[in-house]
Image (cartoon, rainbow, N blue to C red):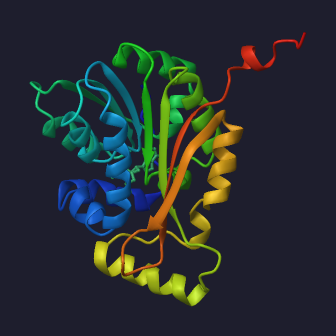
Amino acid sequence: MDQKPLKVPDQKEFDLFAANRGFEKVFNSSYSKAYALFSFALSDYLRNIKTDLKVLDIGCGDGWTAEFISNFAKGRYLGIDSSEESIRKMLKRIPASSGLKVTGVMESAEWMVNPKSVKQIEKLLEGKPDLIICNAACHQIRKSYPDLRKMFASSSSILKQEGTLMVGDYYFPEDMTDEEVEDDMKWIKTETGQTPTPRSGFIKRNDMEHLLESSGFISDTAREIRANRDINLIFYLFVSRKTFSQTKTSLPLS
Ligand SMILES: C[S@@+](CC[C@H](N)C(=O)[O-])C[C@H]1O[C@@H](n2cnc3c(N)ncnc32)[C@H](O)[C@@H]1O
């Protein structure tokens, strides 16, 4: 694997968060309602799946999601993240004795659009994923890799035909004034220590819906909630599945 340094220096912050306070302290507690919605939807999905689950997590962070899944299901989990420290921490925190075998790839999401990587993903997971997650990561990923359509199109080709894609992310809705956005950004800087993403850096809910549709997904549910009670930043969550495969839709009508 060729590991290229990311062009965006802000992203080094994630190494520091992983090495110091850990992502839960920075994100899960600061955006408590967002993570409550995500956990609720994920546990709802996992309730019916106990064994041999295969999960691909894009922008996986330092292992909170892997640990959460390991409490419910057995199988294989592969996390991709550009933060070396996060991958290191994730691999340490899930014991080898866990029923969930966790692997991590320290790469930008761009890595997964390469056909060789697709093969490697299937090898590491011992098959195609049942579930692909990309939570709270698209607005970060696009800072160094803007072609999210390619990332999701690749996800659609990798995912099992009957598989599930869960995509959660944040945005400042259009009815917020620039001053209100400014206030939220100040709150984020003070409370989390993170460099806040400007309004234009997020993908609005409608745009995400179109992005997913154009990448080969249809959404069964789309929910949204304020990230927490102190700010107006919104978190949305799409639970999607693949649209019919090309071969099915292109069959001639008789
Ligand atoms: C806000 S954190 C979310 C982490 C985790 N998904 C969660 O739900 O807590 C965003 C993550 O995206 C990762 N990231 C940023 N740019 C990336 C890229 N180009 N490719 C892969 N991961 C990236 C960061 O390192 C960080 O771990």
Point out residue 75 in the picture as x, y percentages from the top left corner: 26, 22
Count the marks: how many? Answer: 0
Up the image or down, 39 lies above or below 101; here it is below
Residue at coordinates 66% horizontally, 57% vertically from top-left?
206
Point out residue 138 in the picture as x, y percentages from the top left corner: 51, 51
Using the rendered view, name the quadrant where residue 3 is placed: top left
Q: Residue furthest right?
A: 254
Q: Is residue 149 left or right of residue 239?
A: right
Point out residue 200 in the picture as x, y percentages from the top left corner: 62, 68
Residue at coordinates 32% horizontally, 23% vertically from top-left?
53
Up the image or down, 76 lies above or below 152; here it is above
* Residue 78 shows in the view: yes
Nearest the viewer among 198 and 111 is 198
Residue at coordinates 48% horizontally, 73% vertically from top-left?
233
Q: Is residue 29 left or right of residue 105?
A: left
Point out residue 4 in the picture as x, y percentages from the top left corner: 45, 39
Q: Residue furthest top?
A: 254
Q: Quadrant of the N terminus?
A: top left
Residue at coordinates 11% horizontally, 25% vertically from top-left?
96
Nearest the viewer among 111 and 224 is 224
* Residue 5 shows in the view: no
Q: Quadrant of the C terminus?
A: top right
